[in-house]
Every structure is written in C-alpha cells, then in structure tokens.
Amino acid sequence: MKKSTTSFLLLLVLLCSTFLVSSCKDDEDEEQDSELKLDENQVNSFLSNYSNIVYASYEDSYNTAKLLDDAIKAFTQSPSQATLEAAKTAWIAAREPYGQTESYRFYGGPIDGDEGVEGFINAWPLDESYIDYVEGNATTGIINNPTDFPTIDKQTLMDANEQDGETNISTGYHAIEFLLWGQDVTLGAGGGDRAFTDYTTAENAERRKTYLLTASSLLLDHLQTVLNEWTPNTAGNYRASFENSSNPKSRLLDVLVGISSLSKGELAGERIFVALDEPDRENEHSCFSDNTDRDVVNNALAVDNVYFGRYKRTDGSTISGTSISDIFELADTEKTAALDAKMNETIVNVNAIQNPFETEMVEADGRARLQACVTSLTEQADMILELASLYGINIVLE
Amino acid sequence: MRSYLLLSLSFILLFSSCKNEETEPLFEENEIYAGGNATTFDQSQNAFGHAANKLTTEENGKFVTGNSFFKANWVAAPSSTIGLDGLGGFFSARSCSGCHAFDGRGNLPQNQGDDIVALVIKLSVRNGVTYENEPTYGGQLSSQAIFGMEAEGNISISHQTITGSFADGTSYTLEKPIYNFERMNYGNVHPNVVVSPRLAPHIAGLGLLEAVSEQTLLSFADENDANNDGISGKPNYVLEAETGQIKIGRFGLKSNQVSLREQVAGAFNGDMGITSSIHPIENCTDAQQNCKEAISGSTDEEMEISESKLAKVVLYCQTLAVPARRDADNEQVLRGKQIFSNLNCNKCHIPKMKTDFHEIQALSNQTIYPYTDLLLHDMGDELADNRPDFEANGNEWRTAPLWGLGMVQRVNPRATFMHDGRANTIEEAILWHNGEAKNSQEAYKSLSKNERTDLLAFLNSL
C-alpha cells in the first residue's frame, strides 16, 4: 500500500508539473518543444562586445561629467552669465552619454544591484526645498541652514541622501541641474531661470557654491564606481565574472531584461505614458533644464545600441560587434527583420519629439508624437521577449 | 489537457479507495491558482508586483500610472513637480513603496536608533467608554518631517524573552517586543496612551478580497460560538470616512477599513501627510502649529493627491496578482496541508472562497485561496494591543490572509511576521497564536518534529 501511494504521488507530481508548464505558457507548448539551442560562442562574442559598449559609454559619461565639473569649477571661481551658460551646456552634453547607459539597469548589475549607485546619480523627482530655496520659501534647504549643516561636504550630502532610510535625493545629475537652472515654475520653453548672482551676492552664495562643487565631485565618484566594475581585465570586478560566466545564457537574459525593461516599463511606461496619463506641469525628468526630450532619445538609443551591438562614442568613433539581432536572426529571420525595423521606427519616433516635453504632453500634436513612442517602444519590447522565448529565455517584466 | 483529465481520474481512484472520512482532497486541481485568474507564476523578488491577467487596456494603463505614483517619492511643496508635492508636515515614508518595497511586507528598524518606517504606531487615549487620538501627537506617530520641522519622535524596541518547549522536548524562545518612546519633540505623551504597532503587510490580492461578498464574509461569522468549537469570528462594523456610513470592514489589521479606496486614502494621509478628497485635512494636532502652517501642495481645484491619481493608485493595489502556489502537489506539502486542517487552522484561515462582483471584471467570480475569513478573533493577551478599533476589542485582530506567505521573505529578506513583525519565522508566528487559537497552537506543539516540518512546508508553499 505504501509503495503504491508513493508511486501514485510520483505520478501526480509528474502530471502536475506538465500541467503547470502548460497552464503558464498557454499555447506556447509547441515552441517549448522545439526550443532552440543558443550558439554559445556567439553569445560569448556578444557579451564581450556588450561589455565593451558598457565600458565605453560609462567612460564617456565619466569624461563628460569631468568636463561638467571643470565648467562648474570655472563658474564658481568667477560667476557670470557666460560661465553659468557654459556650465549648463556642459551639463546637457554630459546627459547625452549617460542617458545611453540606462539599459544596463534593471538586472541588479553594478549600477542598481545591492550596492548600486543609481539612486545617487540619477534619482527623480528631486525635493528641491531639501536643497535650496524655492518659490514661497526663501530660507529652506541645506544650503540655507548653516545651523544644522555647518559644513557641506561629501559626507553631509551622502548622509542627507539616506536620511529617511530611503532615497531622499540630494545628489546626482538632477541636483546639479536644479543648482544651475533653478525651479521651472512656468509651462513652456526655457526651463528654470536661476540668476548667476545666486553665486555672488545672494544669501548663502558661498554655501551654494560648495554644494554645487560637492555634488559635482560626488557624481564623478559614483560614475567612477560603475566604471571600475566594467573596466576590462580587472580581476574581481563585475565585468570579469560577467564575461567569464559559466552560464552565458543567464547573462544574456540579464541583458535582455535590461533593454526590455527600459524600453517598455521605464521609458514607454514610467517616463512617457505616465506623463501623458497625468500631464502635470514638470512631470518630466529633466524638468529644470527642459532637456527631457533628449532624455527620451538617449534612452531609446540605450536600447538600440545594445540590440544592434554598436555604440557611437562622444569622440565620433564607433564600437561594434556581435549583436542581439545576430543572435535572434538564427532563431527566426523574419521576426528579427521585423524587430530591426521596429527599432528603427522607434528612433524616428523619439527624434520627432519637440522641445519642451512639458508642452508636448499637453498639446494634441505632441501627445500624438509621444503616443507613437509609447506604442513602438512597447511593441519592440514585446518582440524582444517573443524572440528570446524561442531560445527558452522567458522573461516576466514588472 | 489530456494529462489533466488523467489527473482528475486519479483523484477519483484515490478517494474511492480512501476510508478516512475526515480526509480532504489532497491536491485540488486549481489550488495553485491562489488568486484565480489574478495569479502570477513569477517567483522572483518581484513576485508581488504583477498586474492581474485579463485587465482591460484602460485598466492596464491605470495600473502603470498607479504603479508610478505608488513608487514615486513625494516631495515638499512648493516644487516644480507640482503633481508630486505636498509631502508631510509629518510622515513615515516618502512613498508607498518606502514601506511596501516591491509591494511586499515592510520590516522593523534594523539597528538600535533607526527610525520606524514601515512600522506604524497608532496612538490613542481612553475617554470614558470610547478611545480618542492621543491629544499631542494624534492618531499615529511619525518619525519623519519635512525640512525645517522636527519629527514627532521615534520608538525603540526592547524584548522580553519567553521560553517554551514542544512535546518532544525541543525548546524554543520567543521575543516579546516592548515599545519605548524616544526623542519625543512635542512634549510628553499622555500618561494613559495606548500604543498599537502595525507592520506594513504585502499588498497582493487585495482587490480579490474586496470582491468577496458580504454574504460570504458573514457566512464565516460565528460571533457567539454557536457551534462550540472555541472559535468565534466577528465582523467589524466601521465608519466609512467618505460617506459617514457604518459598513463592514475588511482591510487593516483590525478590519477597520471598508474598502481599498478608504485604506489607500488613509495611508496617504496618515503615512505620508498627503491630503485627498477623503482626508482633506493634514494630520497635525493643535500642539503642532508648525505642521499646520507647512506649505500645502493642494490648490483650489485639487487636494495634494488628485482624484484621478488616487483612483489609479487604488486600482494598482486592487489588481496586483497573487503568487501561484509552489510545490502544491509535493508529498510533504500535502501532508502539511492535512495537518493544517487537523489542527483547525482552516477554521479561521479559510482556504477557499469565491469572489462576487467587482467593478474590475478580472477580479469578479474567481475561485481564490486567500486563507482568511476577514473576521476578528481574540488572539490572547500576549498579542493584545488593548486598543479598541470600532467593534474590535483590544484582544482582537483580523485573520491574516496567508496567500503569498512563503514569498514574503523572498521579496523582503528582512521581513518578519505577525501584526507587529515580532515573529522572525513562520513557526514563531504559530507559537504566538493564543486566545481562540490556543488549542491549535497547543496541538502544534504536540506534533512530532517531522509533522511540524510538514506543516511549515505547506505554509511556505502558499
């Protein structure tokens, strides 16, 4: 009796696992049966090319942030309209490569894993009044509070950043953006309108300088952290284990999670759809500088670069090698051609967005342009997931 | 599907040969779908974070936006991002996900001196036969405040060790939390204050619970224990803030909220200091003028959270899918399931029910496995907060839904169990059960080591 019970239960387990698989995959049974095997050499070649792209784009991010830091130093040494404008220009230039790195997120890599620094680099929305004065409150912020914050240094800002047991943003690109442009309290082109005299004659001008210089220096530190993790031929860093993984298929899955999450959940969903759905003033990431249209383009490029296995560096040179498109092509030529075309369509769509984003999200023509981006970004992510599943790589997006 | 039919046939064979009339079906064909159609098979850290299947396109869009505002940090007013300002005066966290990270359960402060964030401390004082908010600090203690204001204060937790042993001689220890006020910035707390701590639960499957009909819920009630099994089950009747009507409560640790809309608006107001049409007034007492004078994020047209956004966050909370059962057909899990019912755990943690109508079609008419009756039970003196909440007395708590239980620490490894997070493990949670659950708890202690392991395997499969 005991024996028969055991064998019955064994049968039960086998049948149920079949049932489980078939029920969660619906009608994909056939695809499951004919699951394709990845060409491991090709995947390793892709992972190596991907690592080169990641490193190059973080290096470009670091170098442009260094130019920004130089411009901020020049501005704080002799504040004027000209030096302020030069710093703003450098900030916008620095955003170009960084926006193209955001597809390396969402899989717990160096940027947003347990020790990840993403929250210090690019968090949004920013609590402006936590940093400096805002309209209607001239005395708020760390800058205007020498009593509680007698010194402003890296430690102060890092501590302030974690004050509530979660990210209370006082660092990163957007903190620097706020300190260069100031609040944008109007709808329409132009962004914020901070006077350079905030750094000369205004209350707490010296502390404001210190804050800006400190935030800029911290940004370099944090970019250096991720850059180190992707530096080639460095024992013990993330890249070493990534490239020499015993399970390249799982690394490929990470990469695909990154690009599809950015494409669908983050860019199409969080950054564009939510703005269309709740078109509040400044419901946009680079709200002080009115640079959100470029954020969208660069994020779309972040997906495109990885998918096509190429990256155009800020110096104009290009890195290229084995791409996801190459890997997918071996699985299904026709579907891959359609995905290639969809990726190209997305780039056309994002480039059609007009500045400023805050006007685009409220006016009919702009809304249609943004909606087209949502659609093609979502479609391309779904196509990526479908093609990946041919290799038995099944991804559940948030 | 052919194998599936075979499976059903196998059951018939098994049960026709089975003599024990108490035996429940070992493996029920659909029980892996804990949330019916609103079930997800993801077992990653994001297992609580998926939308129910079969939402309409419009509902999916609202889910995306609701998710965004659930995660987004609110900021102090005035800000450039006017859609997200109005945080505080006082608050516990800047975002919903600040406590419910990955839509999961919160955790206690990790180190001495850390702020309470996901642990809400309700405060009240007796006034004759009723209880009112504590006069200086209000109904809830906030450990955070906007820039330029002192927070209300904090709680530190010390422990009293309770020891016991299983029938087989194995001993165990439990840690009873003792709460101490710290750095109270607005003066003394009322000497007769009653403190009720509540740890943020995971929020998957809540819309399905909302869709359980009142008739179904009342069918579980046995307020006067007419069947003499030592277990009652009492509905809470509470005030709906929006309508001023008295209705049956089913959300909150004492079933003190009628609907998710009320629960969410209450949390925005109490936990983040965000006003809404339901709670248009900031959470400040007369003793806290600075809080009253803080710059508001609301305008003439709109409270700090607009109707539209509130509705989307509510929809988000309603439509989060429940994790599917893992290993539901495993031999050990099935033995544990049998022990669960032998111990009468299923008398309160009712495994299976049907949802009725919900305005979200995908949640309507689903067979679900929430393992709760949504009713109040006396849980004994050790767990009591001695703070009545509408019809709930100081010993009574709502039966916690057990679906997703085995995923709680996968989503948040630091999460702990029971209403205040005092149980580090599921076993400790069982051992804390008392009052109406005393017989079940004692029966658990008399199980063999193997039987206890089987029961825990079952609970972890939920």
Image (tube, rainbow, N blue to C red):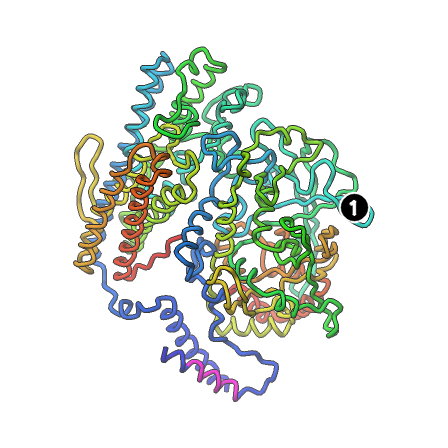
In the rendered image, the vertical position of residue B226 relative to residue A379, given as above or below: below
Residue A19 spot, x, y in % from top left = 39, 73
Q: Residue A321 appears in which quarter of the rendering? A: top left
Residue B248 spot, x, y in % from top left = 66, 59
Along the viewing direction, whichever of A95 and A253 lies nearer the viewer: A95
Residue indicated by mark 1: B126
In the rendered image, the vertical position of residue B103 relative to residue B22, given as above or below: above
In the rendered image, the vertical position of residue A228 relative to residue B30, given as above or below: above
Looking at numbered disc 1 in the image, what kind of residue is underneath it?
Answer: Arg
Tell me: B450 left or right of A233.
Answer: right
Category of crowding for the residue at label 1, using alpha-carbon neighbours closer than 10 angstroms: few (below 14), some (14–19), many (at least 20): some
Tell me: B362 left or right of A36.
Answer: right
Element carrying mark 1: strand
Residue at coordinates 35% horizontally, 33% vertically from top-left?
A223
User: In the rendered image, is residue B212 in sight?
Assistant: yes
Q: Which residues are magenta?
A: B7-16
Residue B400 spot, x, y in % from top left = 61, 60
